[in-house]
Amino acid sequence: MAFRNLISSDRGAVRSITINRPDKLNALNRETINELQIAFDQARHDDSVRAVVLAGAGEKAFVAGADIAELSAITPIQAQTFSRAGQRMMRTIELLGKPVIARIQGFALGGGLEIAMSCHLRVGSERARLGLPEISLGLLPGFGGTQRLLRLAGRPAALELCLLGQPVDAVRAHQLGLLNRVAAVDALDDEVNALADQLAASAPHALAGILDAILVGGECPFAEAMDFESKAFALTCTTEDMREGTRAFLERRKPAFTGK
Ligand code: COA
């Protein structure tokens, strides 16, 4: 399907989904949220896709938040629908069953940080600025930001970023765990592509099990989470890739995973 606000392309088993509204710093309007829902549903169901890179077009911003022009005129009922659509789309990313990397070259603010936090890895350039500035609009994050930031960076950082609304730079974001890697501006794509290639060449069922154990198991009480992990572990032992990975180690060669 052709998108109006996204560019989707494949490089081998890596799908790139780029939000393409650079003149509005890739702000998330309703249409873009709906298109992202469709694009990630497609990525989930396409077996040839093993990893996804989410990016924003242009040099300045990954995503500068929800579209404030749309928000300014929104009714409470529309706001609830908008929040739920954004939350659903971001939960689809989080539970995709395939690793998703956010490529953050500049601003990731509001909904931009919220969507980045629903990705599994975040790689930023030295120019990245991350924050939840909704308070300056008389609002609060409505796409899961309060909860994901709390879980990712803990209560002190969640309270500070939400209450004060000031963005943090790449170094602080890295210290807080909001960025997994920081790259020089010119090295960002190489860093993102290397990670994406590594993930795309890994055993997909093992990746899915890891994502499931951490993201779903991690929400359960500890004993249940342990049980969840054991079952996910056992499930990977049904795969040809597990036999290949262990055999390759013993035969001192690189494994060739097929996804079976
Ligand atoms: N929603 C809608 N439009 C946005 C936007 C958003 N979240 N963020 C930026 N834009 C638009 C601007 O209105 C401007 O459009 P225009 O050229 O038609 O006037 C364009 O993108 C460029 O933004 P501008 O503000 O001129 O760039 P800047 O370099 O001066 O500032 C930011 C960059 C990111 C600091 C600033 O755009 C900003 O604070 N954006 C809002 C961040 C925010 O509060 N996000 C949370 C939303 S809930």
Image (cartoon, helix red, strand yellow):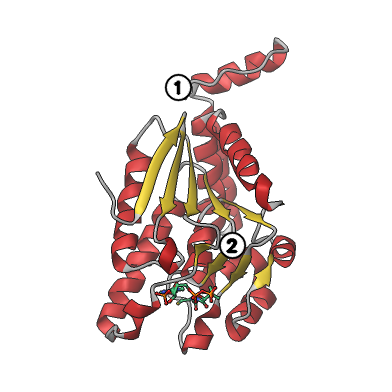
Q: Is residue 48 above or below residue 26?
A: above
Query: SS for tag 1?
Result: loop
Residue at figure coordinates x 66%, y 67% from the top left = 153
Direction top: furthest residue? 251
Query: SS for tag 2?
Result: loop
Q: Can you give x and y, in whole percent of width and height, for residue 114 in the image?
A: 50, 66
Three-letter code, disc 2: Gly
Q: Looking at the image, which is closer to me, 101 or 146? A: 101
Quarter of the image with the N terminus in it: top left
Q: Is mark 1 within 8 Å of ligand 1?
A: no
Quarter of the image with the C terminus in it: top left
Please give the label number shown on residue 260. Answer: 1
Q: Which residue is mark 2?
A: 106
- Quadrant housing residue 179: bottom right
Residue at figure coordinates x 69%, y 13% from the top left = 253
Q: Is residue 125 left or right of residue 54?
A: right
- The answer to whether residue 234 is seen in the rendering is yes
Few, some or many residues within 10 Å of mark 1 (<14, 14–19, 20+): few
Q: Can you give x and y, in whole percent of width and height, for residue 143 in the image?
A: 43, 70
Q: Is residue 241 above or below residue 168?
A: above
Q: Can you give x and y, in whole percent of width and height, for residue 149 in the image?
A: 58, 68
Three-letter code, disc 1: Lys
Sequence-first tag of 1 and 2: 2
- The answer to whether residue 220 is seen in the rendering is no
Residue at figure coordinates x 59%, y 82% from the top left = 165
> Gap between marks 1 and 2, in whole Å?
38 Å
